Structure formats: structure tokens, C-alpha cells
Amino acid sequence: MTAPTIVSGRPASTTPGKPPKPRTTAEGERPSRGARVIGWAVMIVTAVYFLVPVYWLIVASTKSTGDLFSTPGFWFADFHLFQNLADLTARDGGIFWRWLGNSVVYSGVGSILMTFICVITGYALAVYRFRGRSVVLGAVLGSMLVPQTVLAQPIYVLLVEIGLNNTMLGVLLPQLVYPFGVMLGFVFAGSAVPGEILEAARLDGAGEWRIFRSIASRLLSSGSVTILLFAFIGSWNSYMLPLLVLTDTRLQPVTVGLSGWSQAAITIPGLQTLVIIGALVSIIPIIVIFISLQRFWRSGLAAGGVRF
Amino acid sequence: MASGNKKRLFAAAATVGVLSLAVTACSGGGDGGSGSGSDGEPVTLEFWGWVPGLEDTVAEWNAANPDIQIDFFRMTGDDGDKIPAAIDAGTAPDIVQMSSHSLPGHIVNDRLTDITEYAGDLEDQFTPSSWGTVVFDSAVYAVPQDSGPSGLLYRTDLFQQYGIDVPTTWDEYLDAARALHAADPDVYIAQFSPNEAGFWIQSVWQNSGSWYGIDGDSWQVTVNDDASMAVADVWQTLLDEDLVKVVEMWTPEYWAEVNDGTIATINYGAWFPALLKESAADLSGQWGIAPTPTFSGSDAAGESGGSVNVVPRGTEHVEQAVEFISWLNASEEGTTHLIDGGVFPSAYVGQENSNLLVEDEYFGGAVANQTFADAAATVPDSWVDGPTFDLTQDALKDAFAQVANGRLTFAEALDQVQAKTVKDLKDMGLEVRE
Amino acid sequence: MTSASPATVAPRPGRSRGRLSGGLRAAPYVFIAPFVALFVVFLVLPIVIAVYKSFFAVQRSGLGFGGGEEAFVGLDNYVQAFGNSEFLRSFGRVLLFGAVQVPVMLLIALALALLFDSAMVRGKKFFQLSVFLPYAVPSVVAALIWGFLYQPKVSPIVELLRGMGVDPQFLAPGTVMWSLVNVVIWSVTGVNMIIIFSSLQTVPREMYEAARIDGANELRLALQIKVPMIMPAVLLTTLFSIIGTLQLFNEPMTLRSITSNISGSYTPNMAIYQTTTLGGNLNLGSAMAVLLGIATMVLSIVLSAASNRKKGGAR
């Protein structure tokens, strides 16, 4: 819910194309023993705070319905994880896995397309001066302030007009509008693609598309991963629109499906367990993506000169 | 996100369904009756519903009725939210299951088909209270599906242990509440759940009350009329004397209280026992069932509303759609499927069904559904829903949260909700007689 | 809000005019075409529809059966929205919410980022990941999890605290907002920390050397050099966090199912949802949504103006 923002322009020390000096170790002399103890203490408290709810989710996922609330919440009872997974799979003919697959399609295909659109748009806005450029930039910035509640209903009506309601395309297309990603692409391109290189390439007779494809896109790769990550998370967590657009439960993404279950689960402990294990399973892909992309997007944020 | 009412309707059905799907799968049989499109052309109708096992029901119907093919879509928790958008965009199905309380809201937005022509003669087949919820200004807008006549579930062991008689009137109920709590300070006769308006609706309905009324060409709002204030008196006493446990319904917290034995009675609809069995399985044999305590001068039971089947506007084949929902909800075969799916049917033919009236081990071998079936016949037909029902229910929850916190009395809360409801109706441009 | 002018990387038309091909002139338009097309269809058009709808209302009479006529009513819906005390109160509520949540969250994020940037901590990767992890948990699921941890009879946290002689009431009328604040802090601190941390990484190292030679310790270094350097970033994060709180929806909506102390119109977005979904009044809901949009823009303009002045004063 909190959107980070961007300051354009680069830090004084970095010149275009040259990322800041990498720092593997922190500078200065070794901190005192006291400082290190405090550092550790703060870190442990922090990790406990941020991890405990996830830990609870993991523990709860291994419990049977009966044990869920009758055994200590922070410790394992009879190990029921595989039974829960089997129940999850059995429910409504394995629809949960279908939802998960749908989410992978929506977020996987969606975030790749989003990234492409954001990067090429941001690149064009950063690199070219053209009529209407400032209008587009202003619109992109302004649109980041529009409440989603304004859009959901009209978008649905539009999709019906186009005939895309209750289709996967109807969920995919609207999410491709990702102004935050465009802003990221704009800032990345502004700092990572030096004008000189472009000019040189043009003098060599390269076309604009080829310049983008073979030069700029490579310079923008780590920035692209950052956009991809944000796009993937945003898309994985989207809820309102798919709920409205899809009639067929078999097309739902996992967030909508789980939320539907949790509505019903308030009254049914048997389903409660499935919501819990389902929630755990549903965050695994996103964690895997996050960890595997960590190296790229971290350097993307830092090297892109993005100062949020 | 769904209104609480829809949520629990949905949940109630879902629970039993899991248990009885096997039964449904085996029961099979049953001839689907007649059924052909009026012009002989086969038609296909789309049906959104949530009763468990409807897939099999529909398959059976389709096999027997080649001219009226039903295409069934299962609704999950939040799906109700998209019905209005779907109808307004012209993409609605031909038949939809919904809460009876949401009917007027859809009618004033012209989203439903008046089916009086095809369904008008079904009146005799349903209990007056359930039929009363589908008729507005003498037009029929839906066919009742299931309902929730009330019964008093009570902890036989606790009542026995403390030598307390099971109350038959609300006055006796208060006495029993005091006796129970005095005998064991950890035991309360009931819980007060601000988030569950169903209890309130049920008691007002039992007392021949309603939130709305129709008087000629204008709406009436009666949220704080005498019938409701009588209910408020009972609850204010319970709350003031600390005889009820304040806990939000349906939460794990709630079920923990039930399982701990702090809640001695639950006076609720016919769909509730299934949830209780599932969530408090260990208490099997310790619960009994009795008729809901009565208000003086009446032997009526309460009701909190059920679900109905509607034909959205824009449906081409209204007659065929009604033919199907008549079969589903008012025929022997149809209601058998509903019962197997775990709901308490609104039609008499369903309430007399031997699949429904079975002995229940959970209630010490009593035929719990007999108590509910008897109750169904006594529920007043006083209840009228209004176009702002969901808003009123939401306002009631918010006001009752304040009551639970001691900031308002029940009477003050009702006055507040009354004023809000009148304003909401007027804001819609409707005529209101105060 | 942000001045966007990467002037140096734009081609200099003066110099390259001679070689300007038609391709170069058309290229930017081709490149932005997919985005602009989607933007117009799925963002501009819906906004136009919403604004348009907000000037209409369904006119009914009597019982209203059989529907009504949609007619132009000018600003009536806006007048009605302003007359709705619950709706106005929801703005006050989220502003109070933001006034607490945003500073606390950013202070934590800033402190953690500074710690990660110092030599005081080992195992940075693990700790950074654990702080960021909640961001990957969908907000509905996050609220669901915390919901379990808030309910006295089932919460291990309550059990733990009771063992220590404290009886916490996470869902009482006076505390439920802070419980909600906690859920949001838990979810978004990570992403803000990472952003501030990235910003810290771009601060030129030479500045630290100079300060160290002057005898500054790590704490002074952090407060006097690092923080001022990344202040613009922190201010803008603040701005967007506050905008985020105005849009609060999923978390309170989910927690509402376990406590009635969160009303149906607790936040502006919930009030809009209530009006459109429960009340079925799309026109009034559109007007309320437009008002929320305008309020968000006004607030962001005011805040960025204020932060600009502050920046100017610091120079």
C-alpha cells in the first residue's frame, strides 16, 4: 500500500554509466564491543518481530483442525502437514492448485509484459525529446494518486464492452498499466543509458529499435529486474479486479480463491486449516522469486541512482 | 467483504455439504419431471449457486430434461458482490441464488424479473414466513430455497448439573441466565455478538416485527418500533446484569468459548447445528434442543432469513428458468437434493422429507430438525425487507459495537439506526412514511 | 513533485538534426504506444466514466420498484458526500492513523537501514530478508495472520503476555487502531527500509572519511552526515506512505470480520465500498471516490511543497 517514489537526478559522485563504488565491507574501524552487542540485540528483536507471524503460519500449517487452537500456537503439535496438503489438494477437485497456476500465469506473464512496457516507455521518456513527453510524464505521475476503488467498476464495464469479462485476458490487460513501473524505468534509463552511447550508435547507422534492443536493454537489465519484482508482487497481490472480472472460479487467482475460502472458513474450522496452509503455499512462489532475484534488484536499486 | 448474512448462509451450506456430498453422490435416482422449452427449442440456462452437490443435482435434471439444460457455476464467498455489476452489464446468469434480504435492493435497481406469472401459484407449497420474503407489493420476485427457523440449543449437562429448567419464555430465560451465572461465574447463558445481526433479526421477526414495511406507495421504517424495543429490553437486561459473554460470532475466539463451555445456549436457525457439530465435535451428546423461548401471548418461533433463487433481468427464458427452480425448491426430488446438500428447505414437501427428519446423535438422539420444522410453521409472516437492508444491517452492527462498549443502550442504538435508515431511503429518492 | 529532467541523456537535436531520420522522430511514439494505449483505455477512460457518473443520480419515486431514471444532478452527490459525517470522520481517522503509522514505520525503516549500512551488524542478508519478507505476504493474508494473533483465546502472544501478568486487549475500541497500525508497519517497513538503504549506498564514501578524520563517531556520522544526505528520499517516502494510508482498505476490511470495533466506514475506501456495494449507489460512490482522489492530490501537493521549503531552508 505504500508506494515508494523516485528522485530523479544522480548522486554527485556517480557519473552516468558508472555505478557507485561497490562496498563489500562497511568503512571505518571495527565498532566497539558494546556497539556490536547493541547491533545484535536490535537485529534479533527485529527479526523476531518480522518473522514471528510467518513462523506462526508455518507452525499452524502443520496442525490438524483439532490442534489448531487447542495446542500452544508457537509450538508444533502432531505433525499434520502432509494430511493438510492432501486435504488442500482434495478440496473441490484440486481447485487450489489451479488457482495457484492461474496466479503464476497472471503474475508471470503479466509481470514480464509489464516490465517490457514499463522499460520501453520509461526509456523513450528519458532518452527522447518529443512533443507530448511532458504530458505523458505528468499523467504517469498523477495516476499514481488515483484510488483503485474509482477504477474497478468502470474497468469492468469496459471489459464487458470489449467482451473480455470472465477471460484471463480481462485480468491481464488492465494490470499492464503500471505507472510506478514506468517511473522506475524512466529513472533507470535516465541514469544508466548515457546519451553519448546512443549518439555513437546512431552515427554507426543503427536504428532506434536496434539501439534499444542491443544496447539500452542490456544497460537496463538490473533495473528491469527491480521492476519485474515489484510488478510480480503487485500483480500476485491484486484482488479487487480479478474478483470483479471473473465469474468462473476456475479462472481465479489464488488471492481471490483464498479470500473466498476464508470468508467461509470463519464458520468452518475444517476450511480454516486449508486457508492457513493455502496462505503458506501461496506465499512460497513469491518468496522464491524474491530471494532468487535479490542480487539483481538490490544492485538495480542502488546502481540505478534511484533515491527513494 | 460479504454482508454477514450472505456469509453465514454460504458457510452453513458449505459445511454440511462436505459431510453429505458422499450421500448425494450415492442417492442419485429421481426422475427430473417434465420440462421442455415452451416453443420446443432446447434452451441452456446459466445458474449461479452455492448449495453443495448442486453439480449432481443439475446433472440429473439435465439428463431428464433435454430441452432445458442448466449450466451451473459454483459461487464462492465474495461472488455476491459482482452480481449487480453483472446484471447491469447484461452478463448475468439466468438464475442466481441470493439472500432473501437482498431482494428489494435489487428490485429498486430493476435487476430482477417479476415471475408472478409463472411462480405465483407456488405460494401454498412454502411456509408463509418464507413466501412472505419473496413477495413485494403483491409481485413475486423469487422462489424460496432454504430458511432458518429458530430453535434453542442448550447444554443439557450444564442445565442438569445446576438443576435449572430449560426456559420456555423469555422471562424464564432471564431467570435461567441469572441462575446459571450465579451457579458458575464462568458460564453465560448466551453470547452477545455485535457482528451478527441475525440473532437480532430473528427475535424481532419472532415478535411479529420487521425493519421495514410497505404502506401503499411508501416505505415504512420500523427498526425501533415496539416489537423491536421488547427485544431490546431482554438484551439490555442480559447485558446490564453481565449475563452474556461479549464475543464476536464466527471467530476462532467464539468457537473457543463454545468449546470451553462458557456458552450454555445458542438460540439460532436450522442451519446452525451443522456448524456447531463441525466446530464443537467434542461436545456431541451434551447439547439438547428445545423450542425457542416465546414472547408472552404467542407461541411463534423466530427466523433470520434464508436464500432464494431469482431470475435476473434480461433473461430470455423466464418460464423455463422458473420451471427449473420450481423443481429444485418445491418438488420432492429437488428438495431431497437440497437436504442432502445440507440446507433446510423452505418448502413443506422438503420439511416433511424423511431425509431431513433423522435422529441426531449430537443432540442425544433427538430429531433436531423436527423442532425446526415445527418452528417453521409458527414463524410470523411479518418480516419485510427494504432496499437499504445491507446498510441498515451494517449500521446495526456498528451501533451494537457501541452497545457492547457501554457507550449506547440498545434503545439508543435502535433510534440511531432508525434515523440512518430513514435517511438512506430518502437519499435514494424513495417515499418514506415515518 | 519530482523534477524530471534527464537533460543530459536526451539527444541534442541541434547537433544531430542533419542525421535525424524519420525513424528517430517516430521512435519515441512507437515505443510509448503500447503503454499510452493501455493507459487511455484502462486508466483515463475509467476515470472519465467515474467522474461522469458522479454527476448523475438515479431518480426514483414511491417504493422505487421497477428501477428509476438516471438523471443529471450536478453537484448533488458531492453535497451529499460532504453531508455524510461518517465519510468525513473516516478521513480524520486515516489521517490520525497516518500521523502515527508513517513516522513510526519510517523511523524503524531508517534506523534499520542505518544499522545495515554500518559495521555493527553481521548476517545482513538474512536480517534484510526477514524484514522484507512481510512485504511479499498479501495484505489480506497478513491481516488474517495478525487477526489470529490478536484474539485472546487463540493467540499465543496473548497467552505469553498473560503469563507475564499483562492482559492485552488488541481489539478493544481504544486499541484496535494501533493493532491495525501494527499490521501495516509489519507489512511495509521492509520495502521502505530497502529503499532508504539503497539511497544510503549512493552517498559518496569520501564524505565519511572526512568526518572520521574530524573525529566523528558512527552515531554522529549517521545523524549528521548520512541522514541529511538521504533526507529528500525520506521525505518523499513519507509523502507516499501518507498517500498509502488514505487508501487503506484490505487490512481493516479483513480485521472487521473479527471485531466490530472497526466500523463499516472506518476508512474512506471502506465508506466508498459500503456505498457502492452494500448501498448499491454507484453514483454517490463515484463522487466519494473522486473526492478521495482530489484529497489525495491536494495532500500530496501540500506535503511536497512543505518538504521543498524545508529542503530549501536547510541549504
Image (spheres, rainbow, N blue to C red):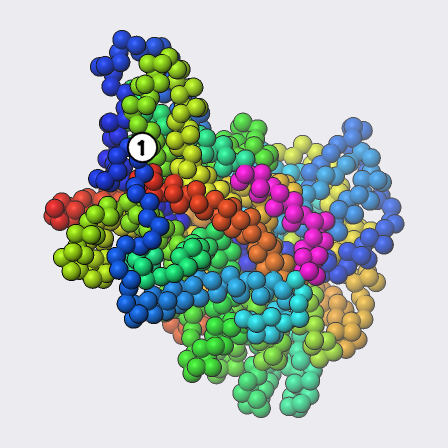
Categorize mark 1 by other alpha carbons within 10 Å: few (<14), some (14-19), many (20+): some
The residue sitting at 36% across, 43% down in the picture is: A301
Secondary structure beneath label 1: loop
- Image coordinates of residue C29 in percent, x first then y, are 37, 19
Q: Identify which residue, C261 or A261, lies in the foreground.
A: A261
Count the numbered circles shown: 1
| Quarter of the picture holding the C terminus of chain A | top left
Q: Residue furthest top?
A: C18
- Image coordinates of residue C279 in percent, x first then y, are 47, 49
- Image coordinates of residue A67 in percent, x first then y, are 64, 71
The subunit letter for the residue under badge 1 reads A
B152 relative to C297, above or below = below
Going by the numbered disc 1, the residue's amino acid type is: Gly
Q: Which residue is mark 1?
A: A17
- Membership of B180 in magenta stretch: no
The residue sitting at 52% across, 77% down in the picture is: B245
The residue sitting at 63% across, 72% down in the picture is: A77
Q: Quadrant of residue B162?
A: bottom right
Q: Main secondary structure of the magenta part?
A: helix
Q: Identify which residue, C160 or C54, lies in the foreground.
A: C160
B360 relative to A204, above or below = below
The residue sitting at 77% across, 59% down in the picture is: B20
> Quick check: can you spot residue A170?
yes
| Residue segment shown in magenta | A82-108
Q: Quadrant of residue B67?
A: top right
> Quick check: can you spot residue B208?
no
Q: Identify which residue, C88 or A213, lies in the foreground.
A: A213
